[in-house]
Amino acid sequence: MVIGIDDTDSREGMCTTYLGALLADEISAFGEHVGDPLLIRLNPTIPYKTRGNASVAICVRCRNPGKVIDHVVSRIESLSIMECENTNPGVVFVLESDFEVVKKELRSFFRRAVRDVIGIDEAKDLADKLSLKFRAFKNGRGLIGALAACGAMLNPGWDHTYEYLAYRKKEVWGSRRSVDSGSLYEADDCTYPETWDSVDRENNVVVCVPRSPDPVLYGIRGNSKHAVKKAAQMVRSEDIERSCIYKTNQGTDMHLVRAAGVDGVEAMHSYILEGTVENAADTIQGGHSIFVLKDDSGQSIDCAAFEPTKNFRDVVRELLPGDRVVVYGSVMDNTLNIEKMKVLSLAEKLEKRNPGCPSCGKRMKSAGADQGYRCKKCGTSANEAETVRRERNIEAGFYEVPPCARRHLAKPLVRFTDSENTLFPAR
Ligand code: ATP
């Protein structure tokens, strides 16, 4: 049986991944796990999300599915933060006998939940149509993520990574976390590039330890179970209650759709979009840098590197009109929020300067408005300014936001292969 769960937490506490890890451990008493538990990240622009728009799925082989269903439902009822207006848990159970019948429709629902915006009624209609067992609490929004997670479990062919999540003991939830940051840097040293985003070296911050009051102590992301486990074994921290290695679509760019042009681009969707820089970046109040990108049909869109993207803004500020780029990111309020960018080609940076005197070699002075240039010493003159080509402080290639600003779904350059033709940061 596949079990999909979503929307059990609030900003004040809990975390659906914790409930998933707890249930994965408890369900071992009822049967045996099939494959890895899944942590699925859905459309990152959804406003109802608590933090990272996650849902989870578990697959278990058991003699008595009814018992498992009762146990899961009672745990969701007792552990979800039901009093929070924005917490609307959903859980879906797909019995093995139904796998083949429901697989295809749940696959496309999963894909859409990562990229599109789905209504609660659509999710309920699909669960009814497929005769799935489910429970939708309160307004039932959690059903969307729960169905999507089941779709991911039943269709395992997608690009994936892993995350080792360590959870705190209940009595310390909400208090300051105790994790030795030196040990995280050491773990990163030993396992990068097989793990990534534990620390942000350029900005000197630990990324893998959250600050919110939820049960997560830290999360190590990587390409394999072996790598994340190896890194986690090196972490020195307070005692943990449990841990779980999830298979996940984090770091895969699954949310991005290639857009033919600006015309088809919609809010609350995420794109890969090619175009030409129309205006160099303006840095507005708050430190956000925004430039205008024009597609080949002449339509334009604002592209932003917001303040939290830190040093990535320096790259964006080097762009000049005429540069050809591909931007990757989500569209909100008519602005594409850049996660990474490929500079395809650079325009020439040309500057005008006063011409040199052919006799003494010094720069001539302006002879007055529209009167050209003159060298006072030698008496030589010239009508036109000189045009010089300046070096650009940016090269063609890929650039990405730093780990501290990375979205869960965004694929870090370190995961790109050579054939994807990237320049990824070497250590
Ligand atoms: P956490 O990361 O701490 O688990 P969260 O950020 O996952 O929290 P939720 O509390 O799960 O946030 O809230 C997100 C809500 O949005 C869920 O009810 C989920 O079903 C719903 N949702 C997810 N994807 C979509 C989508 N594509 N369209 C509409 N609703 C969605």
Image: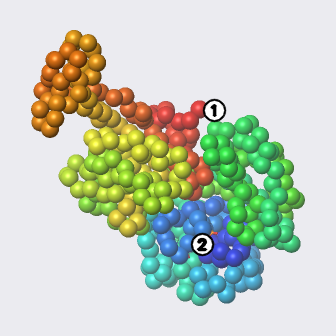
- CA gap between label 2 and label 1 equals 34 Å
Closer to the chain start, of discs 2 and 1, is 2
Q: Give above or below for 208 relative to 124.
A: above
Mark drawn on residue 427: 1
Residue at left offset 82%, top offset 50%: 180
Q: Say if disc 2 is inside 8 Å of ligand 1.
A: yes
Query: In this image, 54 relative to 338: left or right?
Result: right
Residue 275 seen in the figure? no
Residue at left offset 67%, top offset 38%: 192
| Res. 193 image quadrant | top right
Q: Give above or below for 286 relative to 276.
A: below
Residue 111 location, x and y as percent? 46, 62
Quadrant where ligand 1 appears: bottom right
Q: Give above or below for 243 relative to 394.
A: below
| Res. 387 image quadrant | top left
Q: Find disc 2 in the rendering and name its residue.
A: 50
Q: Residues within 10 Å of mark 2 (few under 14, many from 20)?
A: some
Tell me the element at label 2. Answer: loop
Which amino acid type is marked by label 2?
Answer: Thr
